[in-house]
Structures are given as structure tokens and as C-alpha cells.
């Protein structure tokens, strides 16, 4: 397998990075990088880590990292996670930066510990409202992987604070069964794009075809996360199989949330390299003004009415002839 | 009257659905089936996920109907936790 990290990889311009993936030979992973500098969203690092963990130890190769920001890969724990030690020493930078290095989560207990440890690492004590949204998003996404992905490597998560844009970027990735396989256990989806659409729709879960979900799953996790992103005008991406859904930022105050994710401003690509698993990336602005409680009020209005509308749409009268 | 102190079981951020499921199966549903009231005390809980609250109370609403809410008291909820509980309660009644 191969991939290339260009000089800039963020949700808005991630397509070339994703298209650089070549999954043809799963026995090794070769990673090339931009030769001058690079600035990389944690979701990209989590993808490389997740992929690298599927190949035999020692079969992951980085080209000679000459980029001055190559230390970032080391600092985020990518080289250590992949067992790469043949790269020339990199100058250590101040470790007090606001980031959460790549971490593998395989159990609910590890998830709880990660959530607890993450908050001080991101120095979010002065932004409690945003901290709540971040804690919420990471928690629900990790739980999704543990419950639905059937990923032997678990969830790979990383986060980074960007002071210039005052945002926290988060990536959560797995190499499990992917959204289509999960959602089609109970619903019909012929394509990855249809599966993504269903997964982002409130009240739909792969665990049942029944409205309202099961005793343990309401089918609301991804809808809530997308809704938080919509309300805060944040970037959000969901990639599984050959489909990539990217939420575009909506302008102005959001008073109503679309039930159908395809009604939100978005970009959908259906011809991406086939990622076996699920990739979620999100940027959460620390300058958002809406409180977490107000966010939940907007979601509440839309969420229940969505269920009622869908039940109404499915209601049929008996036909008499 | 039975009281569950959520923080004692789930910490300041209630997100572990395994814990929610245990509370549901071992305490909440048996208490309600016995015709007793139950108090869910969120004192010291800063936040909760929709998944946690759903796993903890949705089955009670499904099994006993919305009237069961007359027998569950949500105590010491901050605004955020209250908002999540209201979402789950609305949703369960809309979907049944």
C-alpha cells in the first residue's frame, strides 16, 4: 500500500491525500511526504496509523523526512506506533503544545480514561462550553467504533489545537467493517453513499429496523455530531468504503437542522479509494458563541420532529377496490 | 424510594454505556417493576451523552409507557444534562 502526505492536509483540502492511497498490496505500507514542509490534520495521521497497524511489523516505510515540520509526526506518536526507528533523529520541540498524540482505544475503560486525560492535554479549562462539545463528540465517536466497527485494531484517535485559527481538530479512524456493512444489517443501502446518508440520519441504527432504535442504540450518535458541526459552522467529514461526505460550513445562525444530511451544504464523492473501515474528522472552533445547552435545544427540536415526520411519511392507508 | 448516585458509577462525564446498562438492568427496571419510584441523582455530573441516557432510561419508557416518567425523578441535573434527558424523553415518546 502507498500514500503521500502533501504539504497541507486538512478537511477542506483532504481529497488529494485520500486519492493518494493505493491499497493494492496489503503486505506493506510506503509513505512519502512533501520534501519541504507539511501541516497535517490529525485525521490524516490517524488514517496512516490505522493502515500501518494492519501490515506486519517492519513493513512500514517512510521516505527520508526532510520537512522541517517532520517532528510533528514523531511528536504525535506516529513513528513509535508504527515501530519506525530508522529515521534520523528529529529535534525535540516544546512538549507543552496542545495536542493529544495518536492513541489506540479498544475498550470502554480505555475510552473513559482517554476522555478524562484528553481535557487537560488540550488546555480546555478556560473554554468549558467548547470542552463539553469536544468531550461529547470524541466520546460518541469512540463508542461507535467499539460497538459497531468490529475493528481488531480498535479506534485510533488524535487531536490538535491550532492557535491561529483557534480550533481543535480531531480524527477518529478504524479499519473495521465499514458503515455499509453495519447499516445494512437492518436497512437497505446499495452504495456506500446511501449507507453514509442513513448513518447520519436520526433514528437509524444498524442494530434494528425499528423506529426508536434498541435498548442500547438510538441511532443518533452521528446525527448529533454532524448537528454540533452544523451549529458551530465547523468542518466535518465522514469517509467509508468509496464514499466521502464533507459538510460545508453553513452561514448565519442555525435555527433548524436538516434530517437528511444531503440537504445540508455538503460535498459527496463516490469514487474514492476503498477504505475498509470508517474515518471521521471534525474541526471544533473555540470561538463559537452558542452554548452546549443551546446546541442541544436546537437538536431536540429537530430530532423528535424528524422521527415524527418519518413515521408520517411511512404511514399508509389500506387500499380498497 | 431508591436513589442512584450517577457520579459514583459513571464519573463526572456520564458516557460509559456499559455502566448505564448495568444500572438499568440491575436497579432501574427491577425497581420500577416492583412499583417503586426511583431517583437518578446527577449531583456532580458535568455532562452526559445521549447514548448514556438512552441506554439508561429508554427501555423503561418502552416497557411501561410514558407514564413511567411519573415514577422517575431526575435530581440535581445541570442545564446540559437536563437538555440531554429531555431529548431522549421526547425522542422515545415520538418514536413509540
Image (tube, rainbow, N blue to C red):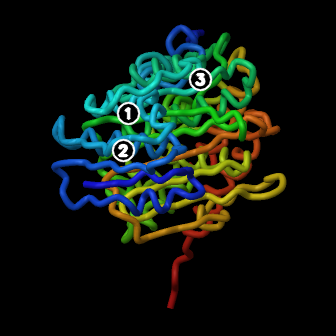
The residue depicted at 43 percent of the width and 64 percent of the height is A243
Alpha-carbon span between mark 3 and mark 1: 16 Å
| Image marks 2 and 1: residues in contact by CB distance under 8 Å | yes
Question: Residue A12 at what x, y percent from top left?
Answer: 60, 56
Mark 1 residue element: helix
A197 to the left or right of A82: right
The residue depicted at 47 percent of the width and 62 percent of the height is A16
Alpha-carbon span between mark 2 and mark 1: 8 Å
Neighbour class for label 3 at 10 Å: few (<14), some, many (≥20)?
A: some
Sooner in the amino-acid sequence: mark 2 or mark 1: 2
Q: Which mark is residue A48?
A: 2
A264 to the left or right of A112: right
Quadrant where the N terminus of chain A is found in the figure: bottom left
Neighbour class for label 2 at 10 Å: few (<14), some, many (≥20)?
A: many
> Measured along the vertical axis of the image, is residue B34 above or below residue A317?
above
Question: Residue A258 at what x, y percent from top left?
Answer: 68, 60
Q: Chain of mark 2?
A: A
Sooner in the amino-acid sequence: mark 3 or mark 2: 2
In this rendering, do the residues under marks 3 and 1 share a single chain?
yes
Q: Is residue B64 visible?
A: no
The residue wearing badge 3 is: A97
Residue most extreme to the bottom: A321
The residue wearing badge 1 is: A78
Alpha-carbon span between mark 3 and mark 2: 22 Å
Taking depth in this image into account, of A190 and B63 the one nearest to the observer is: A190
Amino acid at each position: 500500500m502507498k500514500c503521500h502526505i502533501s504539504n497541507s492536509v486538512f478537511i477542506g483540502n483532504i481529497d488529494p491525500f485520500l486519492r493518494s492511497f493505493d491499497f493494492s498490496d496489503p503486505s506493506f505500507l510506503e509513505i512519502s511526504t512533501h520534501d519541504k514542509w507539511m501541516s497535517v490534520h490529525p485525521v490524516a495521521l490517524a488514517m496512516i496509523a490505522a493502515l500501518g497497524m494492519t501490515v506486519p511489523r517492519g513493513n512500514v516505510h517512510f521516505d527520508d523526512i526532510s520537512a522541517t515540520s517532520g517532528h510533528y509526526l514523531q511528536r504525535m506518536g506516529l513513528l513509535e506506533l508504527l515501530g519506525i526507528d530508522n529515521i534520523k533523529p528529529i529535534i525535540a520541540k516544546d512538549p507543552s503544545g496542545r495536542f493529544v498524540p495518536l492513541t489506540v482505544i479498544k475498550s470502554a475503560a480505555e475510552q473513559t480514561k482517554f476522555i478524562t486525560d484528553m481535557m487537560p492535554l488540550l488546555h480546555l479549562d478556560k473554554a468549558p462550553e467548547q470542552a463539553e462539545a469536544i468531550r461529547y463528540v470524541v466520546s460518541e465517536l469512540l463508542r461507535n467504533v467499539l460497538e459497531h466497527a468490529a475493528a481488531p485494531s480498535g479506534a485510533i484517535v488524535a487531536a490538535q489545537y491550532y492557535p491561529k485559527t483557534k480550533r481543535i481538530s480531531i480524527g477518529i479512524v478504524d479499519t473495521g467493517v465499514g458503515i455499509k456493512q453495519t447499516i445494512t444489517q437492518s436497512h437497505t443501502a446499495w452504495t456506500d453513499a446511501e449507507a453514509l446518508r442513513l448513518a447520519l440520519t436520526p433514528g437509524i441504527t444498524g442494530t434494528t429496523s425499528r423506529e426508536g432504535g434498541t435498548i442500547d442504540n438510538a441511532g443518533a450518535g452521528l446525527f448529533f455530531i454532524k448537528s454540533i458541526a452544523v451549529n458551530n459552522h465547523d468542518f466535518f467529514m465522514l469517509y467509508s468504503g468509496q464514499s466521502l461526505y464533507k459538510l460545508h460550513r453553513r452561514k448565519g445562525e442555525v435555527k433548524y437542522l436538516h434530517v437528511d444530511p444531503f440537504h445540508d451544504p455538503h460535498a459527496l464523492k463516490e469514487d474514492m479509494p476503498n477504505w475498509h473501515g470508517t474515518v471521521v474528522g471534525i474541526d471544533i472552533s473555540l470561538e463559537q458563541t452558542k452554548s452546549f445547552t443551546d446546541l442541544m435545544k436546537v437538536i431536540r427540536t429537530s430530532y423528535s420532529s424528524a422521527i415524527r415526520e418519518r413515521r408520517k411519511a411511512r404511514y399508509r392507508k389500506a387500499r380498497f377496490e | 424510594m431508591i436513589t442512584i448516585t450517577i457520579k459514583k458509577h459513571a464519573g463526572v462525564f456520564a458516557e460509559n454505556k456499559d455502566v448505564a446498562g448495568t444500572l438499568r438492568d440491575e436497579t432501574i427496571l427491577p425497581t420500577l417493576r416492583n412499583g417503586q419510584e426511583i431517583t437518578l441523582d446527577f449531583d456532580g455530573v458535568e455532562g452526559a451523552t445521549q447514548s448514556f441516557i438512552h441506554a439508561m432510561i429508554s427501555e423503561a419508557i418502552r416497557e411501561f409507557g410514558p407514564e413511567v416518567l411519573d415514577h422517575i425523578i431526575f435530581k440535581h441535573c445541570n442545564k446540559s444534562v437536563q437538555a440531554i434527558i429531555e431529548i431522549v424523553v421526547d425522542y422515545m415518546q415520538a418514536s413509540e
